[in-house]
Amino acid sequence: MRRRRLLSALVLLAVGAAVGVRMGSVVAAPIGDAERGALLFARQCSACHQLGKGAVNRVGPQLNRVFGRTAGSAPGYKYSRSMARMGSDGLVWTLDTLDAYVENPRSLVSGTRMAYRGMKDAEARSALLAYLREWSDKPQNIPEAEPTARASGLVLDPAILAIQGDPDFGEYLSSECTTCHQRDGSDQGIPSITRWPTEDFVAAMHAYKRKLRPHPVMQMMAGRLSDEEIAALAAYFTTLD
């Protein structure tokens, strides 16, 4: 009996090590090289953001405890209307949403003031997020527990981005869009979508489809559209004066 129990315990330990047990007593596998992330932060982020002991808001908000934080909610920082609106819509910074934002800020928050072109290398982003995670709650829960659970990052197939949209077809499809968004590009409480770069438009719509962007109506509408229809809308709205 003791031998059978010992064998069962060894099997459970092996399985737990292989798949990563989600209990706080077990150290989870890291999401990236935090030391490399510290270097990346110093080179690419520290001109605008602070992180660590005594961090304060600068050009951008301080990033302590950013995981699990509602977008646009760091105390004492004045955000752009776009970022504040996304927070009101329910955007929370998780491993998925931060990864998408760092890769291409405009794919997640249209009109963001962050003048950063994005970090395209996935391994570099993982390293940076691992470093940011060290200054958030419960760093042992990487990446098994919210808010660090990774579902599906915004990685678009190059074939989707290569689709040449038909602007005439896009105009035909646009009637639902323009019940809220203004064709002339004016912003009356709802963000403008005219003259967007097509890649930004496509990325934003796919972020809604994958429920990275939180607005439920946009999630529903984007979910109805095919890749070709999204490309057509992007082609149409980018041509409007």
Image: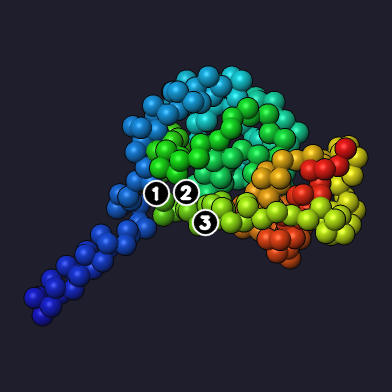
Instruction: Determine which residue is flagged by label 2.
Output: 148
Specify which label sits upstream in the sequence, 2 or 1: 1
Camera-nearest label, 3 or 1: 3
Give neighbour class at mark 1: few <14, some 14-19, many 20+ (Cα, 10 Å): many
Amino acid type, callout 1: Asn
**Relative to 122, is 4 on the left or the right?**
left
What is the spatial separation of the Cα atoms under label 2 and label 1, in whole angstroms? 7 Å
Asked whether 43 or 130 is in front, the reply is 43
Q: Determine whether label 2 and label 1 are within 8 Å by CB.
A: yes
Asked whether 44 or 201 is in front, the reply is 201
Specify which label sits upstream in the sequence, 3 or 1: 1
The secondary element bearing badge 2 is classed as loop
What is the spatial separation of the Cα atoms under label 2 and label 3, in whole angstroms? 12 Å
Q: Residue at x 72, y 30 (%)?
A: 80
What number of labels is visible?
A: 3
Amino acid type, callout 2: Thr
What is the spatial separation of the Cα atoms under label 3 and label 1, in whole angstroms? 18 Å
